[in-house]
Image (spheres, rainbow, N blue to C red):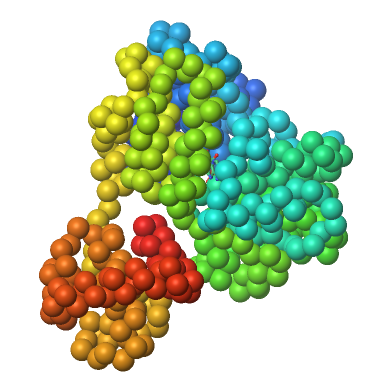
Amino acid sequence: MNGDSWGQVKEGLKAYVGASNYTSWIEPLAISSVEGGVALFEVPSPFFGNYVSQNFGDQIIYHLNKSGALVERLRFLTTPANRPVKTPATSKPAVETAAPAAKSDNSGLVSGGQLDARFTFDSFVVGKPNELAHAAARRVAEGGAVTFNPLFMYGGVGLGKTHLMHAIANELRLRQPELNVLYLSAEQFMYRFITALRERKMIDFKQLFRSVDVLMVDDVQFIAGKDSTQEEFFHTFNALVDAGKQIIISADRAPGEIKDLEDRIKSRLQCGLVVDLHPTDYELRLGILQSKVLQFAATYPEVQIQGGVLEFLAHRISTNVRVLEGALTRLYAFASLVGREVSLELAQDCLSDILRASDRKITVEEIQRKVSDHYNIRLSDMIGPKRVRNFARPRQVAMWLCKQMTNRSLPEIGRRFGGRDHTTVMHGVRKIEELKTTDSQIADDLEMLRRALEA
Ligand code: ADP
Ligand code: MG
């Protein structure tokens, strides 16, 4: 592989990873060699290699193979010249991402390189938004009789789907090393399927997939619209279910909402237990930050975090956990380099781009629309003059949310609710404040709506 063809592979990757990931992580990657199925890259730091391997490893392998290179694993070498001042003592100089072994040797298909050892149940922080998914994952990881098949976990980007799947696999490997556990992304499934077709090795392919005890397919939405891959997936799925083998699937949305996925597959996916990972709430984000701080303390014992910084981050970065982690990582690296404590000012300064991106302004209109949808009333009735309870209560809920979540003044809010007086808004806000403590249904509604709006 020469520089030119790597350039083309990078172009292909751009469409997958998005412009900003591309600039930060892919663009700087220089390939040094491809030998014996291993592509070697030079990276400025172990962290960089780790990050790329974890977040884009599969896609890099996929695109390299697509371009004709035969690559099963990536290796990242830290170039000493580029080494940062402080290198974590615990990190190894090279990280590897392995594509699943091509042939079954019947000794457990999960190769060590492919699972992230850090993604365990211990390192997973449980909160309200993910407790059901976590409990279901735990149950499956116990490896007892198959009670729900498949386990289908869905949720937005960076909410912990992959983490939970690896945690299940890591746990099963400890508890029942004799089981054949295969974890792969839907993209890898497709890649292997296409390769098997091309090389006329469909029998091997079928045998391999039919011989696993636990099959995990991550990001299954990827196969939507890819007809022959779907077909094969369907047969694999059925064969395993019929044989009483456990299947675990993740996707970015509910089965019924994946466009261009065959109906028979949708209904199959819904047969077991479907659990969703909700957008994080403040408490969960804070919990995750606190647990990461404990982990970072081993690597950066000299870095101190001032009070209030974690709360600030949990409050301001509500997009996803990956971004939250990235922010903390950057803070540690920066504080360590400049030898300063992490203060609020330093955080604001060092993370201004992330904070700006997360600084999404929620509008009165958005709130009105969400609340009308939630209570199943028309937007015109929410804003209109009718005072019947069916409209008045949702209207007050919306007013309360506007007061909480926007910077609008009471008169401004009143104007947007059909030109109502600010005293009406104030009355509505107070009413909801009061109901919040006495009426648990309202309290739940508020919490749910706030979360949905923040997501
Ligand atoms: P997804 O697959 O849903 O896009 P990931 O599982 O890759 O998300 O999670 C993104 C990052 O956030 C990972 O580094 C993961 O460890 C971390 N993460 C997500 N949820 C949690 C959690 N509840 N506790 C600890 N870490 C989490
Ligand atoms: Mg994932």
The residue at the point 47 percent across, 18 percent down is 300
* 350 to the left or right of 205: left
- Relative to the observer, which residue lies in front, 73 or 117? 117
The quadrant in which the C terminus is found is: bottom left
- Give left or right: position of 69 versus 341: right
Can you tell which quarter of the image residue 325 is in?
A: top left
Q: Residue at x 81, y 53 (%)?
A: 210
Count up the numbered dots: 0
On screen, residue 211 versus residue 311, left or right, reads right
Give residue 235's position: percent from left, percent from top: 74, 63
- Residue furthest toward the top? 81
Return the x and y of residue 412 as percentages of the image width and height.
13, 68
Q: Quadrant of residue 261?
A: bottom right
Foreground: 185 or 13?
A: 185
Q: Which image quadrant for residue 404? A: bottom left
Q: Residue at x 17, y 62 (%)?
A: 408
Q: Residue at x 62, y 32 (%)?
A: 118
Residue 74: percent from the left, percent from the top?
57, 27
Can residue 86 be seen here? yes
Residue 375's place in the image compared with 58, above or below, is below
Question: Whole-percent x and y of residue 164?
Answer: 63, 46
7 or 426, nearer to the observer? 426
In the foreground, 191 or 435: 435
Is residue 34 visible in the rendered image? The answer is no
